[in-house]
Image (spheres, rainbow, N blue to C red):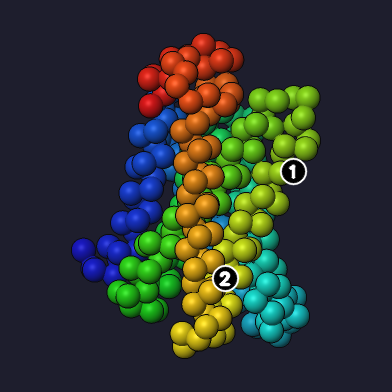
Amino acid sequence: MDPLLMISVLPVIILLGYIYLNDKNEREPLGLLLKAFFCGCLVAVLILLWSFIEGIIGIHLTEFAEDSAVLKSFFQAAIPEEGLKFLFLYWLIWNNKEFNEHFDGIVYAVFVSMGFACVENILYVFSGGFETGIVRAVLAVPGHFLFAVIMGYFFSRARFTPMHRGRLLWMAFPCPVLAHGLYDTLCFTMEMYGEMSGLSYVLSVLFIAFNVKLWQIGLKAIRNHCHICGAKIPKGEINCPCCKQLVEDLE
């Protein structure tokens, strides 16, 4: 296998395997998971197609964001990318009978997001080379994984909490957008200050801290909540306080 292709797809495969193996109570059908993955690939294709069309017609709707790291991060990346992921996720599983446990929302959201990340990663790595692949394997691809965990968490909460469905479903969009936008803002700002000035050192520390916090949030959503009913499991408990499922069956 081509080394660039390998470094492009390997982190995606590892993270997909991780989330799939964590779904221990009732594994999702592979056919539906593949559909979710290819929906994510389609998101990347649609965004590329839109950029191509903008170039042909000479109209750039987000041109106003070019000179600002914050605006560029949100309007050219976070909002369109997470928005399309959310729409495909909703279309694919909201009314699907296989969406019957809280953890399912996280699983399907991750598969959609990893489809997008796979296409994006291949394009960046074949353009930037092996070093780009290493950096993106450590930062960008796990970033998309964690944005998806946040989206899937609120998506499932909305599906199985009728009383607060509207509020929780709404949170499934802006919360990952905020995480994605802040992540990209730090990336773009560090690019602006190329050489390691004092400010870029501070930004690097903030970037690392932000990634650590994202992982804490993501792993807490995966490990500290019941995969069946979504209830928070207190530390040391052997049963879910809501559905009484054995914690060891979920680990």
- Report if residue 240 is visible in the image: yes
| Residue that extends furthest to the left in the rendered view of this protein | 1
Residue under the image location 59 percent in, 59 percent down: 180
Would you call the spot at circle 2 few (<14 residues within 10 Å), some (14-19), or many (20 or more)?
Answer: many
Residue 246 in the image: above or below residue 235:
above
| Residue that extends furthest to the front in the rendered view of this protein | 198
Residue under the image location 49 percent in, 77 percent down: 201
In the picture, the quarter occupied by the N terminus is: bottom left
Residue 216 in the image: above or below residue 248:
below
Residue under the image location 54 percent in, 73 percent down: 203
In the picture, the quarter occupied by the C terminus is: top left
Residue under the image location 37 percent in, 74 percent down: 132
Would you call the spot at circle 1 few (<14 residues within 10 Å), some (14-19), or many (20 or more)?
Answer: few
Q: Which mark identifies residue 79?
A: none
Residue 170 in the image: above or below residue 3:
above
The front one of 248 and 81 is 248
Q: Quadrant of residue 105?
A: top right
Image coords of residue 50 (percent x, y): 64, 70
Give the side of residue 171 with respect to residue 10, left or right: right
Q: Which residue in the protein does label 1 denote?
A: 170
Q: Nearer the viewer, mark 2 or mark 1?
A: 2
The front one of 29 and 137 is 137
- Report if residue 41 is visible in the image: no
Cα distance in 3D space between marks 2 and 1: 25 Å
* SS class, disc 2: helix
| Residue that extends furthest to the top in the rendered view of this protein | 244
Q: Which residue in the protein does label 2 denote?
A: 186
User: Residue flagged by tag 1: what amino acid is it?
Assistant: Trp
Image coords of residue 120 (percent x, y): 47, 65
* Circles 2 and 1: CB atoms closer than 8 Å: no
User: Residue flagged by tag 2: what amino acid is it?
Assistant: Leu
Q: Quadrant of residue 21?
A: top left
